[in-house]
């Protein structure tokens, strides 16, 4: 039986409109699928920092309240008070049953206060670098009062190491099935997708391509994404003589990313850390093979190859490029499972 519930979602950021594809893509997919699967559910979003303006608006028919914190310390108390005031209003209207916070930070802190004041369930999803020894909220908050959801086994183990406590659930961010002709020609050998920051380690991508060029002189690769290291990485590409082998595509829309995935063979993702790594799920669902380190929800199978170092990244890519690869899709992270598991936590399923 499907029931209606009233959920207040607390998040540092939220899409400013339905074309804001870069802002937490897995959350966008999840909310759209949740509303489609459970039409009676009422979701209200409180966005603490982004969008950078104070406003209220609708996103895919979901009410959003943006507090415009802009990551400013001066605005922090205003943002927190605004979230609590919104919760009071929803409670007064009898529209508050569950509070769900993203990241184990200020949203979880305020979520705990709302949960205690109104005696409602508080779910917190660990999102990535919030599971870090540098995050003082891990020690500040009473974790016994929380339903804590991790995105992967790796993240759960790190949380246990840092706090001595087990998470309540492991629920991956899922993806929708992709529709495409998997017999289409794949013209791009290696694809990278992610922010061009040190944590994503795209210098390793360039080094791997440099080595592979000796075996495959006309190798064609592409990196999608942007960040503060873009100029440095592009210069390294020139220094290595790879300007004709590596294309920097910048930020492009998610549907276009999927189209490019469907024209490429291997996702080489050299990131040193992922909370989950949605790009893995997206690549597999679009028929690609994956080469990565053991980060996020890495799970070795016939299309996913886990490396321990840069030499193994190179060897896995070389071996795959020498094979007649299959490009049939593999969705081992279906969004339907994500939605149904959260639905149980929300109390939408009896």
Image: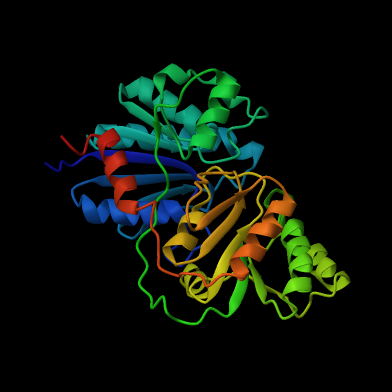
Return the x and y of residue 251 as percentages of the image width and height.
Answer: 61, 68
Return the x and y of residue 50 as percentages of the image width and height.
Answer: 54, 51
Q: How is the image coloured?
A: rainbow
Q: Name the residue located 27 percent from the left edge and 44 percent from the top edge.
A: 340
Return the x and y of residue 160 as percentages of the image width and height.
Answer: 54, 23
Which residue is nearer to you in this view: 223 or 216? 216
Left or right: 104, with 183 as reference point? right
Location of the C terminus by quadrant is top left
So how many labels did they put on this image? Answer: 0
Which residue is nearer to you in this view: 267 or 321? 321
Which of the 4 image quadrants contains residue 225?
bottom right
Q: Name the residue located 63 percent from the left edge and 44 percent from the top edge.
A: 273
Return the x and y of residue 199 as percentages of the image width and height.
Answer: 70, 48
As drawn, 256 above or below 148:
below
Q: Name the residue located 56 percent from the left edge and 70 percent from the top edge.
A: 323
As drawn, 204 above or below 239:
above
Question: In this view of the protein, can residue 56 be seen by the observer?
Answer: no
């Amino acid at each position: 039986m499907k029931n209606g519930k009233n959920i207040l979602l607390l998040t540092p950021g939220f899409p400013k409109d339905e074309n804001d594809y870069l802002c937490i893509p897995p959350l966008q997919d999840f909310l759209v699928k949740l509303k489609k699967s459970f039409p009676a559910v009422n979701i209200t979003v409180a966005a603490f920092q982004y969008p950078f303006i104070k406003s209220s608006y609708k996103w895919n028919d979901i009410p959003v309240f943006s507090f415009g914190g802009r990551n400013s310390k001066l605005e922090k108390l205003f943002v927190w008070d605004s979230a609590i005031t919104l919760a009071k209003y929803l409670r007064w209207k009898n529209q508050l049953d569950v509070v769900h916070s993203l990241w184990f930070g200020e949203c979880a802190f305020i979520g705990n206060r709302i949960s205690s004041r109104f005696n409602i369930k508080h779910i917190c999803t660990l999102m990535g670098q919030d599971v870090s020894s540098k995050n003082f909220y891990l020690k500040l908050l009473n974790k016994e009062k929380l339903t804590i959801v991790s995105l992967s086994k790796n993240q759960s183990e790190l949380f246990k190491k840092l706090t001595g406590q087990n998470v309540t659930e492991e629920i991956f961010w899922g993806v929708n099935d992709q529709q495409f002709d998997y017999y289409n020609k794949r013209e791009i050998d290696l694809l990278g997708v992610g922010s061009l920051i040190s944590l994503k380690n795209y210098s390793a991508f360039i080094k791997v391509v440099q080595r592979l060029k000796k075996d495959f002189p006309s190798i064609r690769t592409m990196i999608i994404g942007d960040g503060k290291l873009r100029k440095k990485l592009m210069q390294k590409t020139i220094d290595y003589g790879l300007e004709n082998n590596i294309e920097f595509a910048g930020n492009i829309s998610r549907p276009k990313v999927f189209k490019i995935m469907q024209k490429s063979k291997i996702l080489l993702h050299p990131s040193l850390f992922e909370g989950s790594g949605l790009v893995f799920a997206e690549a597999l669902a679009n028929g690609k093979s994956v080469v990565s380190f053991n980060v996020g929800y890495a799970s070795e199978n016939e299309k996913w190859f886990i490396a321990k170092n840069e030499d193994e990244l190179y060897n896995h890519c070389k071996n795959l490029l020498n094979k007649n690869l299959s490009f049939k899709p593999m969705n081992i992270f279906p969004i339907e499972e994500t939605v149904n598991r959260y639905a149980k936590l929300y109390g939408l399923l009896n």
